[in-house]
Image (tube, rainbow, N blue to C red):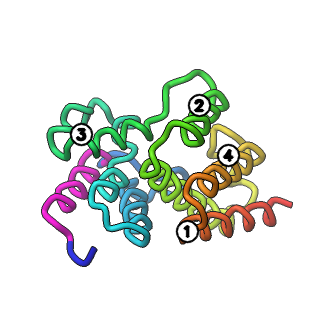
């Protein structure tokens, strides 16, 4: 995609507004930087505007439903975008492990390929951020997460394997695999 269409600009503005009070864990960086990064990563492998918009808004229904709900999302960006975001919205189960297992099961069997692609870009950027922060904070980094180092390693390894199985080897999986390998080496 060579230009930012009015629809894509609207999605960028919606993401910035909906997450205006949020920052990334540990660094104080505005959360919207993550959403823009996910869109950028997606744009390296697709020009499907609905996928790019869903990438921008992938956390909206999970994190800020009181600010921007599914009805608003569908009215603004259509049923396909809303459906993709709903596919990526984690269920509010009691434990981190239960949520993780449900999400992985959905990715491996029920999720559309577009949702798997968005999830891969999301997890890739999260893992890039973790690796950057590990360089600064070392092992103290793991204290900011609900699940510790071992569970994070397990999580990203599982997402990578599922993404590879569902999407095959693409640029995002290449980068995600490299990041998982780097995480494993740093944690050894």
Q: Secondary structure at mark 2?
A: helix
Q: Residue furthest bottom?
A: 2
Badge 4, how many Cα within 10 Å: few under 14, some, many 20+? Answer: some
Q: Nearer the viewer, residue 18 or 4?
A: 4
Q: Give the residues drawn in magenta, as a range.
A: 4-19
Badge 1, how many Cα within 10 Å: few under 14, some, many 20+? Answer: few
Badge 2, how many Cα within 10 Å: few under 14, some, many 20+? Answer: few
Judged by depth in the image, the label closer to the viewer, 2 or 1, is 1
Residue occupied by mark 2: 102
Image coordinates for residue 185, horizontal then vertical, percent: 81, 66
Q: Nearer the viewer, residue 177 or 28?
A: 177
Image coordinates for residue 21, horizontal then vertical, percent: 33, 45
Q: Residue at x 29, y 40 (%)?
A: 82
Image coordinates for residue 58, horizontal then vertical, percent: 38, 46
Report, in whole angstroms, how far the alpha carbon at label 2 lies from the one at label 4: 12 Å
Report, in whole angstroms, how far the alpha carbon at label 3 lies from the one at label 1: 27 Å
Q: Secondary structure at mark 3?
A: helix
Residue occupied by mark 1: 170
Q: Secondary structure at mark 4?
A: helix
Report, in whole angstroms, how far the alpha carbon at label 2 lies from the one at label 3: 23 Å
Q: Earlier in the sequence, mark 2 or mark 1?
A: 2
State which quarter of the image contains the C terminus.
bottom right
Residue occupied by mark 3: 79
Residue occupied by mark 4: 155
């Amino acid at each position: 995609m060579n230009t930012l269409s009015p629809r894509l600009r609207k999605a960028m503005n919606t993401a910035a507004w909906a997450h205006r009070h949020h920052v990334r864990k540990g660094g104080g960086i505005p959360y919207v930087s993550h959403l823009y990064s996910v869109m950028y990563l997606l744009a390296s492998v697709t020009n499907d505007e609905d996928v790019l918009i869903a990438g921008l808004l992938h956390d909206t229904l999970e994190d800020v439903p009181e600010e921007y709900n599914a009805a608003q999302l569908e009215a603004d960006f259509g049923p396909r975008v809303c459906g993709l975001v709903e596919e990526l919205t984690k269920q509010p189960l009691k434990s981190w492990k239960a949520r993780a297992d449900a999400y992985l099961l959905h990715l491996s069997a029920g999720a559309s390929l577009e949702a798997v692609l968005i999830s891969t870009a999301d997890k890739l950027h999260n893992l890039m951020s973790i690796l950057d922060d590990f360089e600064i904070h070392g092992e103290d980094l793991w204290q900011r997460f609900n699940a510790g180092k071992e569970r994070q390693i397990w999580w990203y390894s599982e997402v990578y394997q599922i993404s590879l199985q569902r999407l095959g080897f693409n640029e995002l999986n290449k980068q995600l695999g490299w990041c998982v390998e780097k995480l494993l080496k740093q944690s050894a």
